[in-house]
Image: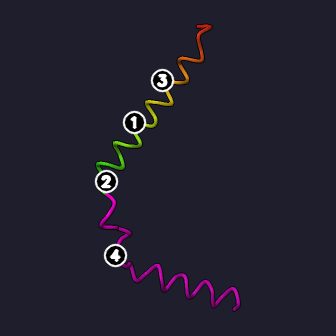
């Protein structure tokens, strides 16, 4: 497969659009809430270890 053929195939695939990447089992609020919780937990852990300030 040549470089031009690969580029043409990828451009055709990208222009078709598809379903937009949505998946029925992924709830955006649950995913965002979980990410927020993990980041806040990491912030809390970081501040516990940084006691010299």
Secondary structure at numbered mark 3? helix
**Cα distance, mark 1 to mark 4?**
29 Å
Q: Position of residue 50 (x, y in %)?
A: 59, 15
How busy is the neighbourhood of tag 2: few (under 14 within 10 Å), some, or many (20 plus)?
Answer: few
Secondary structure at numbered mark 2? helix
Q: Position of residue 43 (x, y in %)?
A: 49, 27
Q: Nearer the viewer, mark 4 or mark 2?
A: 2
Q: Residue furthest right?
A: 2
7 or 28: nearer the viewer: 28
15 or 49: nearer the viewer: 49
Report the disc number at residue 19. 4
**Cα distance, mark 4 to mark 2?**
16 Å
User: Does the residue at mark 1 contact the one at mark 2 (Cβ under 8 Å)?
Assistant: no
User: Which residue lies at the image location 48% right of the left edge and 23% below the top edge?
Assistant: 44
Task: Answer with mark 4 or mark 3, whichever residue precedes in sequence.
Answer: 4
Q: Position of residue 25 (x, y in %)?
A: 32, 63
Task: Answer with mark 3 or mark 1, whichever residue precedes in sequence.
Answer: 1
Residue under label 2, please give it: 28
């Amino acid at each position: 497969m040549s470089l031009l053929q690969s580029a043409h195939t990828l451009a055709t695939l990208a222009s078709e659009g598809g379903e937009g990447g949505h998946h029925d089992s992924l709830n955006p609020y649950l995913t965002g809430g979980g990410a927020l919780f993990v980041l806040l937990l990491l912030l809390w852990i970081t501040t516990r270890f940084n006691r010299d300030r």
